[in-house]
Image: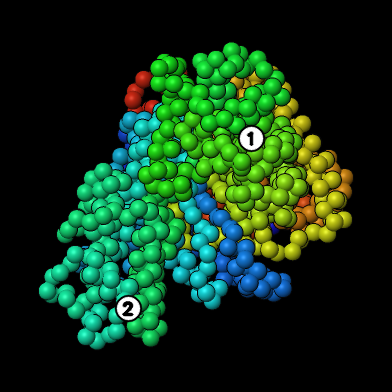
Amino acid sequence: MSALPSITNNDDIRYLGRVLGDVIRALGGERLFAATEAIRSASVERHRGAGIAVDHHLDALSLDETLDFVRGFMLFSMLANLAEDRQGITAEEGADVASAVQRLAGEGIDRDAVLALLDQALIAPVLTAHPTEVRRKSMIDHRNRIAELMALRDTGAEETPDGDRIDEAIVRQVALLWQTRVLRRERLYVTDEVETALSYLRDVFLPVIPALYQRWDRAMGQRVPGFLRPGSWIGGDRDGNPYVTAESLKVALGKASGAAIGYYLDQLHALGSELSISAEHAPVDAAVIALAEASGDNAESRRDEPYRRALSGIYARLAATYRKLVGTRPPRPAARDAEPYPDPGALRADLVAMARALSAAGGGLLASGGVIGRLIRAVEVFGFHLATLDLRQNSAVHERVVGELLSCAGVCTDYAALSEQERVALLNRELATARPLTSRFITYSEETAKELAIVAAAAEAHATYGPACIRQYIVSMCTSVSDLLEVHLLLKEVGLYVPGDPPKAHVMAVPLFETIGDLEAAPGIMRAWFALPEVAAIARARGHQEVMIGYSDSNKDGGYLTSTWQLSKASTALKPVFEAAGVGMQLFHGRGGAVGRGGGSSFAAIRAQPPGTVQGRIRITEQGEVIAGKYGTRESAITNLEAMASATLLASLSPAPLSNAENESFAGAMDRLSDAAFQAYRDLVYGTEGFNTFFRQMTPIAEISGLKIGSRPASRKKSARIEDLRAIPWVFSWAQARVMLPGWYGVGQAIAAFEDKALLAEMAEGWPLFAATLANMEMVLAKSDMGIAERYASLVEDEKLGRRIFSRIRDDWQITHDALLEVTGQSRLLEKQPSLDASIRLRLPYIEPLNLLQIELMRRHRAGEDDARIAEGILLSINAIATALRNSG
């Protein structure tokens, strides 16, 4: 093994670390500072190979000091993350649209081809409320204020616009962080999750996306079509979450609308200050004069300022729109009453008239960039709805609800007893008639009434905010065509599915294929779906059909390598099915933050998709801590949205990287690797006696349930089985214990047993899918620590069971480690990724003491000690470790 290179902190980490140390000394006291520094120094020296023990320093801490120490290390990790984000550590070379266009040009693909693709494209990051963000929003807000102050400091400024000295303002924010409560006391409600997502959409996406389009317009030499649009699940995702109701759906939509229109009003107000053009000094287009005359603004001071008068009228109409859609007066009311806009298109038309007049009157100098150009783009992208909200529910719920509706209507007394063929025939008959199934004179079960209220709220939303507010209805655990037709039947009850020749579906039913078996069955289900003439007609009229593929459950079901390969194989197998139906394919990737749930580089992951499967249309979930990491600041949002857009262009238009022979050879090798890895993983997780007990006693899965980080229960059912545990706490628990098992287990055995290592090395070098798979696994291996993990294994009450199972895990980690180095030609992990290597190794000395404290606190808690500080310390340590690891859930 080669010697590890020294770690050089970047200037920001040194600066912020020094500020944090000064704050701890000032507010926590000299004793706490000295103890923290002693532990930090000992841990750093141990990781440098000095063999210094950290335990005795930790043992000397009182419980109160333990809590403060954990907070200190957590804050250092948070500030280190901020520093690295600012330094572009996470940015990838060539991961921007201008570079992608240049690369495509070098491959013989001109800008006309790029524009043609973008004209039909959709790239959508979709925010979800999956509970892996352990930090309170207050902590994130202070972190973002520090980022803003650091950006000011970069310019050489010594003071903020308000007159505060910048260094003092940074110290103040760090001090506020130190004195801010880290843990939530109450569990999150859906409305809390809505507010959190809204803060990102309002404060980051609204200003950033129009600015990105200006950049892309310049890169393409003309105005590009609107292809990047955000989405959300929050308030519409009911799968396993009983707290999402029609009311929460209405709240989510109403708040989103208020944020979008409120932003437009602010921009119009800014435009009014800017556009002081006088008719005495510039010609004025007739369209602007008409807007000015219709505005009702007859102030003598503005008689010669038609643009301002026109904007006054537009503002008044938009303020009326706000009152109509949001139900309250806008923060800055209009001076007069006006008719609300009927839709975003009407608002856009007025703004475009203004922009064209400016361009003509200014001889090109006032062309439609600046505030008005960005505002037009914002209205196009965000409309009156801000982000498209998906509906999601489990197919089993639909089956019960539809069965009850059919029974109450006297159509079918026992829908559940029908075969699939009989169900499809019955549902098609019902979908062909406009006759409703529901009646206001029937009292339905609570579940059915709730689901009917949801679709009724969706129909109301379409009428209020426009059809862009809800476009997809995702069916979890979709295993048949009837699972999708049941959604059409529910939509028909509220007018969102309209029978006819052809019929119309205003909301698309989207299958979610999650487990390994689901992924293998996906092509057959979609072939049968398109075989229905009504469905094929709807899909062709729309131009595309979406299919969602789930990373989390496929990983929990079959392990990392098998999940990755089956997702790729399913995408490849779906392509000819869609081509035969004459329908465009839109894949929705249900990725999480951790590698075991699809985490890792989005840029690499999109580029590694099978040829011909992206087609310019892709949606990707952004979950939990990933949202703050990728979109916490405008700078990081720009970096990550650029990466998503550029990767989609390259994946859609670049020539296939492999020849047919390589495809066959590499696919055959992956089949064999996958089979071996699947067998090893299943044998451990589902075939080893006592494994469930081992998992629940070794990891902090029970303690994680005490974190108030989401409104959704941890298990799908009231069961302790791993099969029923949600993938998020499954992955999160293994990360806390530094095992990271879902991100690597079984891969090493598969590689070690594969005879042709030269072929695997060729795959690692030339196949984007295999390269990305190994790169993500390498990161996970680097963040894991079998020495720490063994300490967690000591928590297992049956020592023999603990040793027996942990030895298998430890041995397989070593096998995987050695196999990866052999295939990638490295002498140590991350040898070829020096920035990531430095980032992880910088953090390891700060994570280990947290793990050791967590283990001791868990031991005491499980032994029955009831001091509230012990439970608080466990939860703080979970928070701190997750912050340091970054992509742990």
Who is closer to the viewer here, 413 or 527? 413
At a point 55% along the width and 23% down the height, the residue shown is 402
Number of numbered tags placed on the structure image? 2
Judge left or right: residue 443 versus residue 581.
left
Determine which of the numbered discs, if any, sits on residue 368 in the image: none
Judge left or right: residue 812 versus residue 427.
right
Q: Position of residue 842 (x, y in %)?
A: 51, 53
Q: Position of residue 27 (x, y in %)?
A: 25, 47
The three-letter amino acid code for the residue at tag 2 is Asp
SS of the residue at dot 2?
loop
Residue at label 2?
Answer: 285
The three-letter amino acid code for the residue at tag 1 is Glu
- Is residue 140 among the parts visible in the rendering? no
Who is closer to the viewer here, 553 or 849? 553
| Callout 1 crowding tier (Cα within 10 Å): few <14, some 14–19, many ≥20 | many
- Is residue 209 among the parts visible in the rendering? yes
Judge left or right: residue 224 versus residue 28.
right
At a point 53% along the width and 37% down the height, the residue shown is 497
| Callout 2 crowding tier (Cα within 10 Å): few <14, some 14–19, many ≥20 | some
At a point 51% along the width and 33% down the height, the residue shown is 491
Residue at label 1?
Answer: 514
Q: Position of residue 389 (x, y in %)?
A: 46, 43
- Pair 2/1: label in front: 2
Q: Please report contact status of discs 2 and 1: CB closer than 8 Å, yes or no.
A: no
Spatial CA distance of label 2 from label 1 is: 57 Å
